[in-house]
Amino acid sequence: MPSSIPHALNTLCAGLILISAFAMVATRQVQGVTRFFVAQSILLATSCFLLAYSQHSTDLFALGLITIGAKVVTIPWVLRRLLPADFYERREITQGINIPTSLLLALLLAIFAEFLMSPIVDAAHNPVIALNLPIGLACLLIGAYSLVARREAIPQLIGILAMENGTFFAGIAIAPQLPIIAELAIAVDVALIAVVVGLLTRTIRETLGTTEAASLGELKEEAAK
Amino acid sequence: MTRTVAFNIIQLLFVIGFAPLYSGVLSRFKENVQSKRGPSILQPYRDLWKLFHKDEVVSQETTWIFRFTPYLVFVIPLFVTTLIPVLTDYPLAFAFMGDMLAGGFFLAFAGFFAALAAVDTGNPYGPMGASRTRMVGFLAEPVFMIVFFTVSFVAQSTIPYIVQQKWVASAAAFFSPAHILLLIAFLMLILAEGGKIPVDNPSGHFELAMIDESKGLEYSGRGAALMKWGGQMKFLVLTCIFLNVLVAPWGLAHGTGVADVLLAAPQILFKILLFAIVLVMIETSLSKLRLFRISEFLGAAFIISVAAMVTSIFPGG
C-alpha cells in the first residue's frame, strides 16, 4: 500500500487540504473563502474515492459522493440563494485579529496538531493514519480558530464546515467502516446548519443592515426596549 | 575532472545564452495571453546588443561601487550556476564547494551591491527602489532559510545534487505534503525575488511604483546591459533551482558523454517553457499587491514553508 499510486495521490490531497485551510484563514473576501471551502471539499471527496479504491470500501465511496453532494453543490447553492449578491463581494476589513497574526496562529495550531498526534501515529503503523490524522486535526483546529476570529457570518459558518471537513479527513483514515447512516446524518446536519445560519444572517441583515458580529450587540438593546 | 569542468562550462554557457531567451519568451507569452502580439522572443538579445554598442554615461558623484556593481550582478548568478544542477544529475567539479545556502548568500551579496549602487547615484528613485527591494529581501529571507532547513531535514543534505534525488525516490515522497508545501512556498519566493506580478510589475514604467527596476535606472550602455543580463540570469538560475532541485530531476543528463549533456539542454528548455506557461498564468490572473500587502504575501509563504518543515519532521509527513 505505501508505495501505490492511490496512496501517493492521497498524500497530495492531504498537502493541498492543509494549504486550503491556511488559504481560508488568509482570504479577506467572503467569495474567496467560499471558493477555498469548495476546493477543500472536492479534495476531501477525492481522498475518499482514493481510499475507497485502495481499501475496496463502498462506504468510503458513498461518503465521497455525499461530500460532493452536500458540500460542493448544496451548501454553496443554498448560501448563494439565501444571501444577496453584495454579500459575496464584501471584504472583511475589520478583523479581531489581523491576517498575518491569524496565519501565525493557524500555523501554531497545525504544529500543535502534529505534535499531539505523533504518539498515536507512531503506535498505528499505518501510513494513511499517519498522514490523515494530523492534517485532519490541524484543519479542525484551524476551522475552530476562524470560527472565533472571523467577524462576518458567512466566514464563521465556513469555519464550522471546515472543522467538519477536517474531522472527516481524519475519520476516513481511522474508521473507514463508519456506518453510512452516521455519515448521512452528518451530511444532512451540515446542510441544515448552512440553511439555518444563512436564514438567520439574512434576517439579521434585513433588520440591522449589517452582519458583522462585532456590531450585533445592538440586538440586545432592541429586545430590552 | 577535466570533463566535469568542461560540463560546468557548458552549463555556464547555457545560463548565459538562454537567460535572455527565457525572459523574451515570458514577455511574449504574457502579451499573447492579453491578446496582444508582443515583441519577438529574441528582443532581449537585440536590447543587449544595442546597449553594448551605446556610450556609457556615469555621474561624477558616484563612487567605485557604481562602476563595480554591474560586473558583480553579472558574475554572481554564474557562481551559483556552478553549484546547482542545470544540465546534469550527477555532481560536477564545483558541486561540493558550497550548498544551497551558499547560493542564497551569493544572490544576497549581489542584491546588497545592487542596492548600494542605487543609493550611490543620489537619484531619488534609486534609494526608494533599493529600500523596497531590501524590504522584499528581508521578508523573503526567512522563507529561503526554512525551505533549506526542510530540504536538509528530508534529504539529510543541502547539496542540491543530493537533494534532487530524494523527491523521486517514490511516488509517495514526490506527492508528500512536505514536498508540495515546499514547492508552493518556493514558487511564491521566486515570484517575489524575480519581481513578478503579485509583488512587482516587471513591465511597469512608472518610477514611483517600481521595486526591482528602479535600481538600474541610472545605468546606461554596457552597465545597463550587464545589469539586465544579470537579472535575467538570476531568474533563470532561480528557475533551475526550483525545477531541477525542488520539483524533480527529470530531463537532466545521466550519462557522462558530451552528447548526453548537450541533449539534456533541449529537455531542460522544454521544462522551463512549461514553467513559463504556469508563470504567465499566475501573472495574468493576479493583480499587483499594494506595497504593504507584500509582507502578507511573503508571510503566507513563510507559514507554508514552516508547515512543510513541520510535516517533514513529524512521522507521517
Image: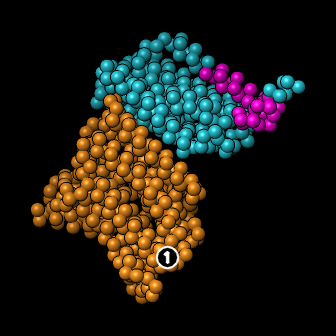
Classify B92 as above or below A94. Answer: below
Residue A114 higher or lower than B54, as above or below = above
Q: Which chain is orange?
A: B
Residue visible at 57% across and 25% down in the picture: A69
Q: Nearest the camera: B70 or A98?
A: A98
Q: Residues within 10 Å of mark 1 (few under 14, many from 20)?
A: some
Q: Which residue is mark 1?
A: B217
Q: What secondary structure predominates along the stretch shown in magenta?
A: helix
Q: Residue B258: in sight, yes or no?
A: no
Q: Secondary structure at mark 1?
A: loop
> Where is residue A84 shown, x and y percent of the image?
75, 37
Span colored in magenta:
A190-219
Query: Which chain, by letter, is cyan?
Result: A
Q: Is residue B211 magenta?
A: no
In this rendered view, identify the residue nearer to me: A53 or A97: A97
Res. A196 in view: yes
Q: How is the image coloured?
A: by chain
Point 32% across, 30% down: residue: B315
